[in-house]
Structures are given as C-alpha cells and as structure tokens.
C-alpha cells in the first residue's frame, strides 16, 4: 500500500473515492458538509431516504456526486459524535478500508483523519489509520501454495494508494512523521503475524535464528547473536534445554540488540516465548486444535515485530530482544514428569507437567537478561489457558511487582487499543509452587494458573524491574478466521515510544 498526506477540499480530489464521516441522526462531519454544500444538498437528500443514518460501521457509496471530481463518495457511519472515541475511530476506519478494497477504488482520500477523536491528537489519528488499514487488509501468503489457488481469493482491483487528509497545511509535517511511524509499526505487526502463521515444519528454532540474522542485515543499528545448544549448556541453561530434549530440532537462544541511544543507557529488554510447536511433550495435549500450537511462539514473534519496528523508527532508546526458541515434542530423550532440572540461576525445578514448558525456557532467558543490566524487562508469552478463561480474547494478562511499570504498560495498551489487564501477584500464591524434591515445582495446581505461572517467573527476576504479559487469549484467533493477530506489538511499541519521549 502506498500512503501519503495532503491538505485540501474534499470536492476537489480527483481520485477513485473520497471518504467522509457521518455521525448518528444524519449529522454530517465537516468534510461531508462541504461536499453536501457544493453538490446542492445531494448528500442530505440521499440520507433523508433512509440509506444512511450514521450508525457505527455503516457504509454507503455514492457515484457521480454533482460538482465533485472523485468517482465515488463514501459515507461512513461514526456513531454519536460525543461518543466518537478510539474504538469508534477504529471501527469506522476499518469499515471504510474493507469497503474500498472490495469495490474497485484503486486510490482514495480519507477525511476520517480530520475528525476529532476523544482524547487523541492528530499524530495518533494518522498513525492509527495506517495500522488499522494494514490490519484490515492483511492476507497470509502461504509459502509454496499454487498461484492459481491464491488467485481465487485475491481481490481483482484492490486498493493500492490511500491518502489521509489533514485540515491545515501547517499539520503536514507532523502528519507525515506520524505516517512513517504508523507504517513502521504496521510492518512490525505484519512480521509478527507472518512468523506466527508459518507452518511449524517451516518456522523452526533454526528458521527464527536465520530470520533474526536477516533483520540484523536490514538495520545498521541492530546486532544479532545466536546461541546453540552447546553454548547454552556452557551457560547452565538446564531448564531451557530440558524442553528441547524430545525434539530433533535443536534449540536456539536469539539475542537482538538495537542501539539508538548512548551505549551507557540502560536498555529495555523484551523476552519472548518461542515454542515453535508445542505438543505438550510427555504430558501430551489432546488432538483437538493441536494444530494451533504452532502459535505458541507468538511471544517470540512479537519481539521480532517490535525490534523491526523500533529499528525502522530509529527510536532513541536501547533495546534488547531475547528469544528462547525450542520445539516441545515427546520422544525417548524427552523430559518426564518427576524429573528435576537445574536452571541457569542455580535454582532447581521439579517438572510435574511437561506441558508447562514456556516458563522453563523463559526462566533461563530472564536470568540471562541480567547481563544487560536492563532498565526494565518484559516477557511476552502464550503461557496459560487460564488466562483465556479469565480475560478471553480481549486483553492480555499483565502481572509484575513494579507497579509503575505495570501501570505504564496498561496505559500503553489503552492508547494503542491493544489492551492488557492487571492481575495480582501476591506472595500468597507462591506456596502453590512448593516441591518436596526441588526448590520449586513448575506448576501450582488448577487454581489461579496464570498467577502461579507468573509467580514462577518472578523467582528469576529478583532485583529487576519486571513485568509479564500473558498473551494466550490475544495472540491468535481460531475457527474459520484462524491466524496470528500480531498482538501485543502495538502495546509494546506504544510503551517504547513513551520511553523514548521521556528520555
């Protein structure tokens, strides 16, 4: 998609379509009112017939509107004007983009970016417009699929050029910078979705390592290091390697370091769970929906997406992305329930359930992250089904003992529309991890599974400002719409933009 910014009257745009907003009860937005006036009340007469009343997400396309230069004028319902917030803006933008792409308008100018969105400024509106557009138009291109098969689902005359309007020429510079940021963020989300959607026989730990090296080649400020099993053995990563024992795919620990600030600036560190396929190991999962366990590396995918976007934006921060990448399979060498392993920190773990493997690879990666002396460390993982039960697909679970960090992440989620919700991390829950044979067990029973998983991780982050995002409910969708979502890349980028702004 080609994006641009411009300022000008809607009736003078010589394009395939001009997009304007209509609020409920047929209340025209400013750009829509301008078209209505120049056309002699044409829009008003159409709406009085009942075809458009401004309900949220409603779309109505007009052709050959008098005294305008565009082929079409699209009216998009925005709901009540006083209730037009971030959610309504997303709904209107998404509805407009999907309709444009389906109706043969190869290029368009959207005036939705001129609307006042409650609590948000122009920079946010432009940035989010790009992100929403890319999200709405994303289509997974399966590697190796016959071109003829893909052609059957392709749009014949897709939208290829989209311009966002600003009310004043004085806003062009700000809007263009926001456009570039939005494009970088959208590319980061797309990368996360592409990695998550790849089949697990393609997206292996070695594949992720190679993809990280490619990112390093694309960005001058990014350096990449990959540890193989021998390196991890030398580091004492017994918990991480225990998960990989049953697989023929060797584990990798991927470290991506972006330097956008002076070398002595403490970095932000992101650690993403990278289980490229999770069979459950000896504690084998049920067959139903096991195919979706290729998405168990979506935490890792989000780290890739964030690193890619931050490097493209050239944010003035230092960032380290760490991805422990493994495949969890049953086999003769696989870890068994009852085994005791020693983590890199020296703490021992009794493995009661081999399907609680994400915390095992994360604990060694979190301890490894200490060497970077991070300002903050955030892990991202499709960690527990309990989080899906608690929060559904609407919000990530958010836990941590640094209340300021938790609050900043929650606020970033609200601003980005990629929400997270805090859960308690009280010491009361730690007793559920007691073991008679090791320092701790890797599971704490049925109750409060999301919290006890975070309690486990907290034992490896003493002295660090740490937060945990459980994305099991938001990282992918199932059923006919099955696919990775790219979350929580938007949340993390919003948080890191805030870090950069306060530096």
Image (cartoon, rainbow, N blue to C red):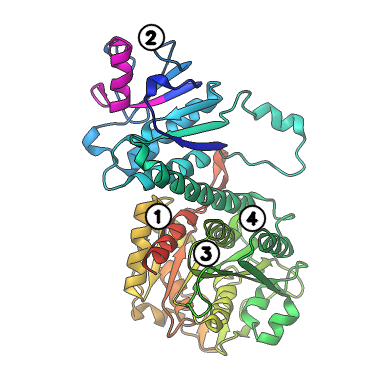
Q: Is residue 29 magenta?
A: yes
Q: Does the magenta stretch include residue 32?
A: yes
Q: Name the residue under label 4.
A: 294
Whether residue 420 is visible here, answered yes or no, is no
Q: Compare residues 213 and 142 and report the one nearer the observer.
A: 213
Say which quarter of the image contains residue 116. Answer: top left
Q: Name the residue under label 3.
A: 381
Q: Name the residue under label 1.
A: 395
Q: Give the Cα separation between the discs numbered 2 and 3.
A: 55 Å
The part of the chain drawn in magenta is 19-46
Q: Quadrant of the N terminus?
A: top right
Mark 2 vs mark 3: give the one in front. Answer: 2
Q: Are marks 2 and 1 in contact (CB under 8 Å)?
A: no
> Could you say where residue 100 lies in the image, as x and y percent from the top left?
50, 26
Q: Mark 2 points at which residue?
A: 66
Q: Do the residues labelled 3 and 1 touch (CB within 8 Å)?
A: no
Whether residue 129 is visible here, answered yes or no, is yes
């Amino acid at each position: 998609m080609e994006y641009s910014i411009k300022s000008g009257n809607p009736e003078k745009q010589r394009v395939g379509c001009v997009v304007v907003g209509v609020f409920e009860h047929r209340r025209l937005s400013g750009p829509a009112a301008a078209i209505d006036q120049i056309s002699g009340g044409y829009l008003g007469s159409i709406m009085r017939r009942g075809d458009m009343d401004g309900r949220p997400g409603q779309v109505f396309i007009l052709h050959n509107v008098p005294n305008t230069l565009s082929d079409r004028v699209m009216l998009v319902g925005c709901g009540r004007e006083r209730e037009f917030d971030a959610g309504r803006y997303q709904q209107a933008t998404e509805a407009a983009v999907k309709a444009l792409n389906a109706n043969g308008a190869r290029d368009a100018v959207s005036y939705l970016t001129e609307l006042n969105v409650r609590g948000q400024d122009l920079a946010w509106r432009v940035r989010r417009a790009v992100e929403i557009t890319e999200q709405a138009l994303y289509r997974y291109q399966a590697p190796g699929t016959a071109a003829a098969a893909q052609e059957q689902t392709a749009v014949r005359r897709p939208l290829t050029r989209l311009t966002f309007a600003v009310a004043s020429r004085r806003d062009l510079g700000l809007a263009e910078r926001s456009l570039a940021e939005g494009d970088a963020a959208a590319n980061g989300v797309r990368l996360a979705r592409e990695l998550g959607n790849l089949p697990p026989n393609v997206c292996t730990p070695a594949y992720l390592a190679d993809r990280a090296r490619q990112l390093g080649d694309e960005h001058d400020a990014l350096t990449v290091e990959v540890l193989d099993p021998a390196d991890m053995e030398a580091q004492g990563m017994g918990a991480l390697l225990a998960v990989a024992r049953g697989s023929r795919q060797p584990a990798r620990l991927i470290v991506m370091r972006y330097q956008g600030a002076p070398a002595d600036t403490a970095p932000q560190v992101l650690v993403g769970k990278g289980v490229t396929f999770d069979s459950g190991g000896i504690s084998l999962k049920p067959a139903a929906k096991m195919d979706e366990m290729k998405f168990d590396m979506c935490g890792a995918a989000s780290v890739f997406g964030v690193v890619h976007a931050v490097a493209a934006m050239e944010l003035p921060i230092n960032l380290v992305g760490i991805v422990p990448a493994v495949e969890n399979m049953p086999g003769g060498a696989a870890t068994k329930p009852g085994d005791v392993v020693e983590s890199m920190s020296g703490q021992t773990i009794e493995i009661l359930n081999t399907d609680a493997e994400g915390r095992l690879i994360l604990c060694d990666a979190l301890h490894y992250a200490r060497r970077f002396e991070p300002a903050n460390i955030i892990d991202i993982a499709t960690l527990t089904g309990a989080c899906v039960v608690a929060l559904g697909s609407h919000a990530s679970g958010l836990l941590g003992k640094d209340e300021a960090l938790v609050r900043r992440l929650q606020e970033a989620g609200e601003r980005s529309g990629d929400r997270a919700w805090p859960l308690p991390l009280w010491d009361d829950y730690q007793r559920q991890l007691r073991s008679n044979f090791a320092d701790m067990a890797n599971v704490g029973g049925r109750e409060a599974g999301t919290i006890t998983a975070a309690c486990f991780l907290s034992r490896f982050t003493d002295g660090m400002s740490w937060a945990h995002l459980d994305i099991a409910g938001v990282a992918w969708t199932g059923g006919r719409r099955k696919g990775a979502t790219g979350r929580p890349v938007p949340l993390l980028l919003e948080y890191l933009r805030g870090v950069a702004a306060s530096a």
